[in-house]
Amino acid sequence: MAGGFTADAWSRILFLDGPVCDGCGTPFEYDPGARCAACLAKPRAFDAARAACLYDETSRDPILKLKHADRLDLAPMLARWISRSARGLIEEADAIVPVPLHPLRLLRRRYNQAAEIARPLSALTGTPYLPDALVRRRATATQAGRSGSGRKRNVAGAFEVPPTRATQVAGLRILLVDDVLTTGATAEGCARALKAAGAARVDLAVVARVRDVAGLTI
């Protein structure tokens, strides 16, 4: 077994190795161009996104174990997944920044799962790691169960680059790291904050992205 996975489990993970939308990481059955119709109609606050796999009953297990069951040993494996799927974005990035938790939630959970993935990703790729360049200044309710518009309202204005850290991101190409991409509301909030502080570009790399009910779309 690798990372606690049996050969059968590995075979059932839907890794996104084929063509994807450059904007949101939606997988394509064939390569129709750089961006999907949704991204062309309404560009995201982040510039490009990549996910290692689809979020389903197989990939969910290690992600939730890392997030809620203290399985920090799984983080390097998930970082390796991202290093493959987001190779092009990593090569262009000047720094890696994790999606932050609010201090109260961090106190309860004791660690930030995005940071636990971002740290070994930095070590693996040699890309500088900026753990405190972005903060969550407002405690938000969980995003689970909310609509896309509800998620956007929930995180509106929740993120910022502290004034003392602005010089860390100004002019840089930032790779934002998180565990799961659902509607993209959290990532967009983070991207807006980083760009407001002067970041030249913000790309997103996640372990998994959801498959919505309409198909392989965000």
Image (spheres, rainbow, N blue to C red):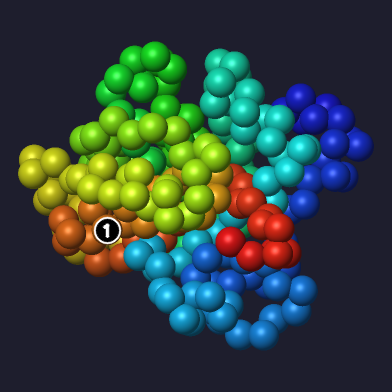
Binning the other alpha carbons within 10 Å of mark 1 as few (below 14), some (14 to 19) or many (20 upward) gives some
For the C terminus, the quadrant is: bottom right
Q: Which three-letter amino acid code belongs to the residue tagged 1?
A: Arg
Residue 183 as seen in the image, left or right of residue 140: right
Nearest the eye: 98 or 40: 40
Q: In the current view of this chain or complex, which residue is farthest to the left?
A: 163
The residue lying at 42 percent from left, 27 percent from top is 112
Q: Quadrant of the N terminus?
A: top right
| In the image, farthest residue toward the bottom | 32
Please give the name of the residue rendered at 52% of the width and 37% of the height, measured from the top-left corner: 144
Q: Position of residue 204 (x, y in %)?
A: 45, 56
**SS at mark 1 in the image:** helix
Q: Residue at x 33, y 34 (%)?
A: 140
- The percent position of residue 131, horizontal first and vertical second, equals 31, 36
Compared to 67, does 50 lie above or below? below
- The answer, for residue 187, to whether it is visible in the render is no
Q: On the image, numbered disc 1 is attached to which residue?
A: 192
- Residue 124: % across, % down: 51, 42
Q: Is residue 184 visible?
A: yes
Residue 148, given in percent of the width and then of the height, sits at: 48, 54
Relative to 141, is 17 on the left or the right?
Answer: right
Quadrant of residue 123 in the image? Answer: top left
